[in-house]
Amino acid sequence: MSHINNDHKYPCLADLINNGGGLCMEYVVEMKAAAVAFDEGGAIWKGKPRYDSIEALLKDAEAGIKRCAEENG
């Protein structure tokens, strides 16, 4: 398994992936979301239905994953 360097602009996303989670970037009809972040327990963040750019999606995912980590320790 590859290791993603945490020293870039998405450290929470990198940490999630390095610890077995992931980010699905495709429209998930059941969730009405363009992206979903998940860990071993399931979905931890779901994005909006649309984004103007990949960068906007990644920034939103980073903020959502960070918020989830802060809320859940």
Image (cartoon, grey):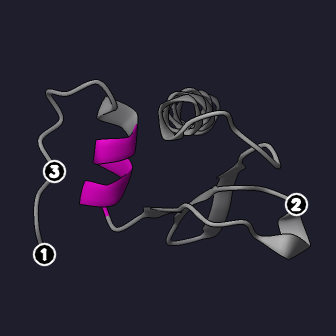
Between disc 2 and disc 1, the foreground one is 2
Secondary element at tag 1: loop
Q: Label 1: which residue?
A: 1
Q: Label 2: which residue?
A: 32
Q: Mark 3, residues whose alpha carbon is within 10 Å: few (<14), some, or many (≥20)?
A: some
Residue at image position (39%, 43%) is: 13
Disc 3/disc 2 C-alpha distance (Å):
28 Å
**What is the magenta range?**
13-19
| 18 in magenta | yes
Disc 3/disc 1 C-alpha distance (Å):
10 Å
Amino acid at dot 3: Ile
Residue at image position (50%, 72%) is: 40
| 23 in magenta | no
Earlier residue among tags 3 and 2: 3
Residue farthest toward the front in the current orientation of the protein: 52
Amino acid at dot 1: Met
Earlier residue among tags 2 and 1: 1
The foreground one among 10 and 68 is 10
Q: Mark 2, residues whose alpha carbon is within 10 Å: few (<14), some, or many (≥20)?
A: some
Characterize the magenta stretch by its predominant secondary structure. helix
Q: Is residue 4 left or right of residue 32?
A: left
